Amino acid sequence: MKKFLKLTKINLYTLFDFYKILNARGFKEIKKILPMLLLYIFSFGFLAFMVYKGIVFTLDGLIALNMPYIILVTIMVTVSVTSAITTVFKVNKTLFNAKDYSFLLSLPIKKSTIISSKIMNLYIINVVFSAILLIPTYIAYIVKVDVDIWFHLMYFITFVLIPIVPTIIGSIIGTIFMAIVSNLKYKTSIDILISILFIFVIYYLSYKMQSMSSIDLANISNVIVNKFNNIYPLTKVYLNIIKENSIFDLIFFIIISVGLYQVFKFGLVKFFDNINSKLSEVTIVNKYRDKDVKVSSKLYSLYKKEIKRYFSSSLYVLNTAIGCIMLLLVLGAFAIFGGDTINKVLEIPELSNYLVFYGPLVFGVFCIISCTTNSSISLEGKNLWILKSLPINIKDIFISKIMVNLTILLPTIFIGSIMLAYISHINIIQYMVLLFTPCMYALFISSLGLLINLFFPDFNWTNEVKVIKQSIAVIVTLAVGMLVALGPLFIKIDINKTLYSFLVGIIIFLLTMILYYILFNKGKRIFKSL
């Protein structure tokens, strides 16, 4: 039990870099950690506040319909579905194919203890993110509705139980999904497509909810609960616990949750090695052909290595190419359905005209979202020494990483400009500006991301999610980039829009030149010292 708790504690420390805070020596180290810690606190606080406002708004409608308890069950269903879905995408790197599994097996720790700690890691992650929904809901509910002492007790007992079964369901579905996809030739592409589809469904639902009244949301919440009563039996059990203060249902909820956890753990321990080896095996079908050996330059070889690394990770592609995908989809919708139709569907008047007038600057915003370089140094991990030991100019290493980002951005800008030209019938000068300014943004964000990653590298990771989504380099790059990209859109100057976009492009070009100078001078020295 002690070893299980120790492993779980270590996993918790690495989850949000708590180990850096606990082991910080002196003010200099604390100063490096503090911005990230404050950013986490602000992000979680902001999300919790937004959830609270939404719950209060929906509760008004439910109170009018005399069924306020429905909001609690709705959030329980939301947490369950969210936990299951996110576990599906996390199980492959957290539970299976984990980088530290071989190392942990070499230690005097039972395999069952290692696997139990990894299941617990998945569960705790889901509990942390579930708290963003469950705690604001609890606060909003006790403010708006009179409750007794039993409600508080039962709510917090079920609070820790709700994510257990969804974590198990998500782990099983994720394992089956990975078992199917791992045998397919284009498994990364399939994973990316499914993830993109999921993201756009979430965006669509979020957008539709914004235009609903409190009564509409209350009715939808009631429908969701009624549907899930048949799909997910624990929904009805939870409803009885919250509404009737049923001790019997609470005991049943505990037995089912803990019992399923124990059964899942037993089965996983028994078949773990077999499942893990099947998911991690790679089948290569390649016919040998006698042909001339091609020799590539150092820069091109580095570029090929970087681009293969990029497309080998669906998470990396999804989190850095989403801006490009969204831009092309929006422009495609305009081209197919017309600007007036899209304006009516999205209920945003003059959206198409705004896109035409500020097209180059809007393209720039999407370029900022799609940055691969802000985690490219960190992703080298403990293998960075290999790259540093090669007889290669550091400048070539930087350029190869920048080229990957440009490989994603420049084709998007070119295709998007053709689509926008087709939609809006712009003249040749406007078209040239539409190409020039976004290209400057592409060069700017590529160098900015790489430079910030050199200042804030993170090599102590076991899961690439931490580097690609949660690292300080990624967050700082996005914050600075969005400030530069959105600033010109909010500045009102009474000059020709095309001229204004061109002038912005010139300013971005000058900033980029400064960044490249710093990157190829100070950046080289930082890279050598890593």
Image (cartoon, rainbow, N blue to C red):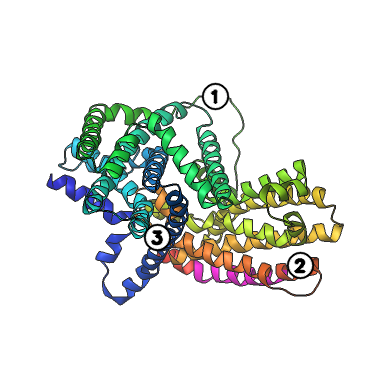
Q: Residues within 10 Å of mark 1 (few under 14, many from 20)?
A: few
- Name the N-terminal-most of marks 2 and 3: 3
Q: Position of residue 201 (x, y in %)?
A: 55, 41
Kind of residue at badge 3: Phe
Q: Is residue 397 above or below residue 94?
A: below
As helix, strand or loop, the secondary structure at mark 1 comes to loop
Q: Residues within 10 Å of mark 3 (few under 14, many from 20)?
A: some
Kind of residue at badge 2: Phe
Q: Which mark is residue 502?
A: 2
Visible residue check, residue 149: yes
As helix, strand or loop, the secondary structure at mark 2 comes to helix
Dividing the picture into quadrants, the one containing residue 43 is bottom left
Magenta region: 506-523
Residue 511 part of the magenta-drawn span: yes
Q: Nearer the viewer, mark 1 or mark 3?
A: 3
Q: Position of residue 7 (x, y in %)?
A: 21, 48
Q: Position of residue 448 (x, y in %)?
A: 55, 64
Reading the image, the residue beneath label 3 is 44
Q: Residues within 10 Å of mark 2 (few under 14, many from 20)?
A: many
Q: Distance of mark 1 from mark 2, alpha carbons?
A: 52 Å
Reading the image, the residue beneath label 1 is 288
Which residue is nearer to you in this view: 100 or 392? 100
Q: Nearer the viewer, mark 1 or mark 2?
A: 2
As helix, strand or loop, the secondary structure at mark 3 comes to helix
Report whether 182 appears left or right of 441. left
- Name the N-terminal-most of marks 1 and 3: 3
Which residue is nearer to you in this view: 390 or 100? 100
Kind of residue at badge 1: Tyr
Q: Nearer the viewer, mark 2 or mark 3?
A: 3
Report whether 518 appears left or right of 416. left
